[in-house]
Amino acid sequence: MRVRDLRKTYKDVVAVNGVDLDVMPGECFGLLGPNGAGKTTTVEICEGLTKPDSGEVELLGMHWNSHQSELRQRLGIQLQETQLSEKLTVIETVRLFRSFFRRGPEAAEVIELVQLEDKAKSRVGTLSGGQKQRLALACALAGDPEFLFLDEPTTGLDPQARRMLWDLIERFKQSGKTILLTTHYMEEAERLCERVAIMDLGKVIALGSPAELVATVGVTPRPQPTTGNLEDVFVALTGRHLRDD
Amino acid sequence: MTRTLEKSALAQLTLVRFREFIREPEAVFWVFVFPILLAAGLGLAFRDRPADVLKIAATTPELVQSLRQEKQLNVQALPVPAAEEALRTGKLALVAEPAPGGGVVFRYDDANPDGRTARMLADRAIQRAAGRVDPVAAADQLMKEPGSRYIDFLLPGLVGMNLLGSGVWSIAFAIVDSRRKKLMKRLIATPMLRQSYLMSFLISRLSVLVIEVGAILAFGVLMFGVPLRGSLAVLAVFCLLGSLAFTAMGLLIACRVRTIEAVSGLANLVLLPMWILSGVFFSASRFPDAVQPLIRALPLTAVIDALRANMLEGAGVAQLVPEAGVLAAWLIASFVVALKLFRWS
């Protein structure tokens, strides 16, 4: 995926202010940033859900205005805060999403992949937060996508549920697919992503592998004898003050 | 067969609509049970009772005997003080006493219709007992045929009201709910065709329609003998056309709204005037002439008028062209505007 000079303004707020990104085939790319940094807007423009004011997005060699339906067939998308219908069962939900795609695994296989087979016949309303996120992942995987967008897939989950989801994402990575992931958790980015971009105020302010960023960005080491981690880089770059959205 | 269904997005979306409906007991109640309960309640309240028998009293055995010839009077023999006390307290409609110079005196309240009726019946009974022969023979023919009772008037109104309510609510609620939960955005992030999504609402609506209209009509026909004088095909066409117009209005109501509160308010704003003006419970012709053209232009009026004319008078398509025109206009206008304004996220 290639993104060039993306810009988007909502009324008086500049959400995305000239973003360039390159995501290589087979890599997991992390997009980090505080709330309101423009991550979700950037991702939704890449997903073809929001129109940019200007700039270019090229995905799998195609563009949204010329290859919309082909791109939709080949992308897997998980949005922030989607609430799937509570009255449907897990298998009914996955079957619905599977029916939109030309190809892909059977619904039962996808459910097995995200380890929800015990819950296949349960209503979505009875699932825990972690199980709901795994179901959302299953819906994103229903069309056997080549490129997967995950917008804050583990926000609000407990540590066990988060680790379980990480295992699932790693397994997907091992099959050679490409992932664009946004997250607030530096640990998550360090564990899953080959490269990360840190966004703030609509711009990319740092780009590289987690190790490179820790090595090159001048992080003041903590008083304790730690070498610093990605979280220190993040806070050093985006400031320590609290922000209101 | 099941495999084709599993692969068809339209089939899966339609199944979702059915499942969401059936798994919402409140919705099932309002669509199926409520109109039947309403029809049963109103049908019983306005059922045809035999004409009331009026209670009167007479103070002499001769008068009692003469008056008992009249079947519509229930005559008691009472002494004068007791009879007058009962009349004063409204337990009797009339008291007959012998007049001092021969003849009879009727005591009653002429402001009370029962009293006036009792006066006429009692007088007729006494005159006939005394040997009067009526110069003109008169026979009664009573109006009791189905089609002229309140339940016959009410049932098409209830069908129309139900089509309106379920047409608007089923689509408006589901769409706003799915927009609010960002589910709609998630769906359009897949290759799903947008027309399949809208079509699934239409298919499920029309299938439920057959059951709900069938249930109300069957109830009316079996329990109250409501007539179906017109062709059932015409009836079906108007239910279908009405339901499509109402569903399109539901789509229009929901086209941009993001919260359940806002869509409820908006839907009530559209529905309430029609419930009152369109003649569900009483004839719309009671409203002043000045507003009649407006009332005639409402889609619910068109549906109810067409159903009444079809069921009660056997009207065919030719007589119902204006109603069909009103409905088609609402259908097309609402649908076109809704699609133009529709917000998919």
Image (cartoon, grey):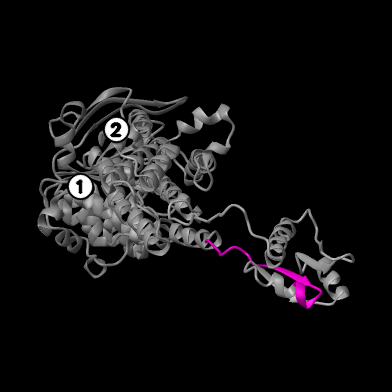
Label 2 neighbourhood size at 10 Å, few (<14), some (14-19), many (20+)? many
Position of B318 relative to A54 (above/below): below
> Which sits in the foreground, B208 or A95?
B208
Residue A221 makes an appearance in the image: no
- The residue indicated by pointer 1 is B10
- Same subunit under labels 2 and 1? no
Residue behind mark 2: A45
Instruction: Using residue B312 as the reference point, say whether residue B97 is left or right of it.
Output: right
Residue at left offset 25%, top offset 42%: B199
In this rendering, is residue A127 above or below B169?
below
Point out the image quarter for the C terminus of chain B: top left
Is residue B61 located in the magenta-colored stretch of the structure?
A: yes
Q: Which amino acid type is shown beneath numbered disc 1?
A: Leu
The three-letter code of the residue at mark 2 reads Ile
Bounds of the magenta segment: B48-63
Inter-mark Cα distance, 2 to 1: 27 Å
Q: Is residue B76 above or below residue B147?
A: below
